[in-house]
Image (cartoon, helix red, strand yellow):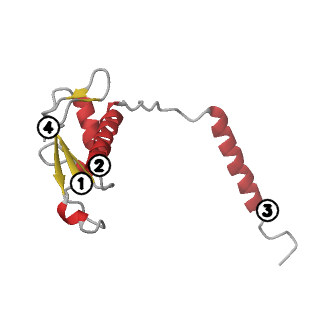
Amino acid sequence: MLAPMIRITDTIALEDWEVTESFIRASGPGGQNVNKVSTAVELRFEAERSPNLPDAVKRRLRRLAGRRWTKDGAVVIQVEETRSQARNREIARERLTELVLKATDEPKRRIKTGVSANQKRKRVAAKKKRGEVKALRGKLDGEE
């Protein structure tokens, strides 16, 4: 089943051919309903083939998706939280949107900082003080 376009940001929108949804039977409780109604949703997004995602976003998405990333470069999201097929479908689309949106955030580069001269002085002073305390633990003069 094809889904309408999903807008992530102003520049990124997922087209309908990239996202496919299939409905499967949910596991767990639900009485007779669970045996005859396919309410669980399996949403599949062809991330690797997507022309709308920049390469950097694809790399971050692959890392964020983890086990949901398939060998052929698709993100698979399964939802079976509610007994409503429509609600499960909404949840799956929301999760996909959040995942891709999180992948668009560029991580800030870490700037290496050195240890300040004052911190070095404090460290040496603390070591010196500790050494003096230990030196005082020795035997006193005049004792055995």
Q: Earlier in the sequence, mark 2 or mark 3?
A: 2
Q: Quadrant of residue 60?
A: top left
Q: Which residue is mark 1?
A: 40
Q: Which residue is mark 2?
A: 88
Q: Quadrant of the N terminus?
A: top left
Give, as a three-letter code, the residue at label 2.
Answer: Asn
- Residue at 68% from the left image edge and 50% from the top image edge: 127
Q: Earlier in the sequence, mark 4 or mark 2?
A: 4
Q: Nearer the viewer, residue 118 or 33?
A: 33
- Name the spot of residue 39 as percent of width and height, x first: 23, 54
What is the spatial separation of the Cα atoms under label 1 and label 3, in whole angstroms? 73 Å
Give, as a three-letter code, the residue at label 4.
Answer: Leu
- Name the spot of residue 31 as percent of width and height, x first: 28, 68
Q: Residue 137, relative to residue 82: is it above or below? A: below
Is label 2 in contact with label 3 (beta carbons under 8 Å)?
Answer: no
- Kind of element beneath mark 1: strand
- Residue at 30% from the left image edge and 56% from the top image edge: 83
Give, as a three-letter code, the residue at label 3.
Answer: Leu
Q: Which residue is mark 3?
A: 136
Which label lies toward us, 4 or 3? 4
Q: Which residue is mark 4?
A: 2
Q: Earlier in the sequence, mark 4 or mark 1?
A: 4
